[in-house]
Image (cartoon, rainbow, N blue to C red):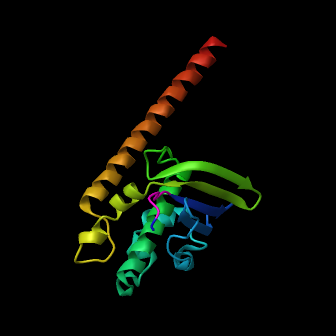
């Protein structure tokens, strides 16, 4: 009988140069992997900025030749990794209502291990085109792209607001001293 808990956990390891070293995406309830590790061959030792700027067809050039399930799982893994990288780079807060909810960061001499929960429904929204698109097996719907663009603008606005508040506090502190 299938498990009702669809929560997934992503563990992502980056080195000190922000290159992807490894990842693991698995079900929280039973520990079973979500897909295999074939995506790692495409992204290992790739800089996070390149991954964030690429879509699945850039990362996996032969995606159209793969079976539907394999294409979907590769896309799901990539979008999960991109969600975690959004938190790592500060473009996302990593809260529970977001695709990747940060759980732990482990800093080591070799790099960092990022662990968190994947919101399966939100990741599915990102790759919704997989279910209905006829021109590409894996792609981003216009609605999902608009949502991503809106989140980027929102994150930039929040960053600007934080910078303005910090600048005001610094000026106030210098004036008081």
Q: Please count the marks in the image.
A: 0
Residue at the limit of the structure toward the right, as seen here: 109
- Side of 118 where 69 appears, left or right: left
Residue at the limit of the structure toward the top, as seen here: 176
Residue 69 position within the rendered picture, expressed as x and y whole percent measured from the top left: 39, 78
The quadrant of the picture occupied by the N terminus is bottom left
Q: Main secondary structure of the magenta part?
A: loop
Q: Is residue 116 above or below residue 72?
A: above
Q: Is residue 158 above or below residue 18?
A: above
Residue 75, by quadrant, is: bottom left
- Side of 88 where 5 appears, left or right: left
Q: Is 6 within the magenta?
A: yes
Residue 110 position within the rendered picture, expressed as x and y whole percent measured from the top left: 74, 62
Residue drawn at (49%, 43%), measured in percent from left and top?
95
Residue at the limit of the structure toward the bottom, as seen here: 65
- Side of 105 where 49 appears, left or right: left
Q: Is residue 32 above or below residue 10?
A: below
Q: Tell me where the magenta segment starts and ends, as one range.
A: 3-7
Residue drawn at (63%, 12%), measured in percent from left and top?
176
Residue 167 position within the rendered picture, expressed as x and y whole percent measured from the top left: 53, 27
Residue drawn at (35%, 80%), measured in percent from left and top?
68
Residue 169, by quadrant, is: top right
Residue 163 position within the rendered picture, expressed as x and y whole percent measured from the top left: 50, 33
The quadrant of the picture occupied by the C terminus is top right
Q: Is 79 within the magenta?
A: no
Residue 155, by quadrant, is: top left
Q: Nearer the viewer, residue 149 or 81?
A: 81
Residue drawn at (31%, 52%), measured in percent from left and top?
147
Q: Nearer the viewer, residue 53 or 144?
A: 144
């Amino acid at each position: 009988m299938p498990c009702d808990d669809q929560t997934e956990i992503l563990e992502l390891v980056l080195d000190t140069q922000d290159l992807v070293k490894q990842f693991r995406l698995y079900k929280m309830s039973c520990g079973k992997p979500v897909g295999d590790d074939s995506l790692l061959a495409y992204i290992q030792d790739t800089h996070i900025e390149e991954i964030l700027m690429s879509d699945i067809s850039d990362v996996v050039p032969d995606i159209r030749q793969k079976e539907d399930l394999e294409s979907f799982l590769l896309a799901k893994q990539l979008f999960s990794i991109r969600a975690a990288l959004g938190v790592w780079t500060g473009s996302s807060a990593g809260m529970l209502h977001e695709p990747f909810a940060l759980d732990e960061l482990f800093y080591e001499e070799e790099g960092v291990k990022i662990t968190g929960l994947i919101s399966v429904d939100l990741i599915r929204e990102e790759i919704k085109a997989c279910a209905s698109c006829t021109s590409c097996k894996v792609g981003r719907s216009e609605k999902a792209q608009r949502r991503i663009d809106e989140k980027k603008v929102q994150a930039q606005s929040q960053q600007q607001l934080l910078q303005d508040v910090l600048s005001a506090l610094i000026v106030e502190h210098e004036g008081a001293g």
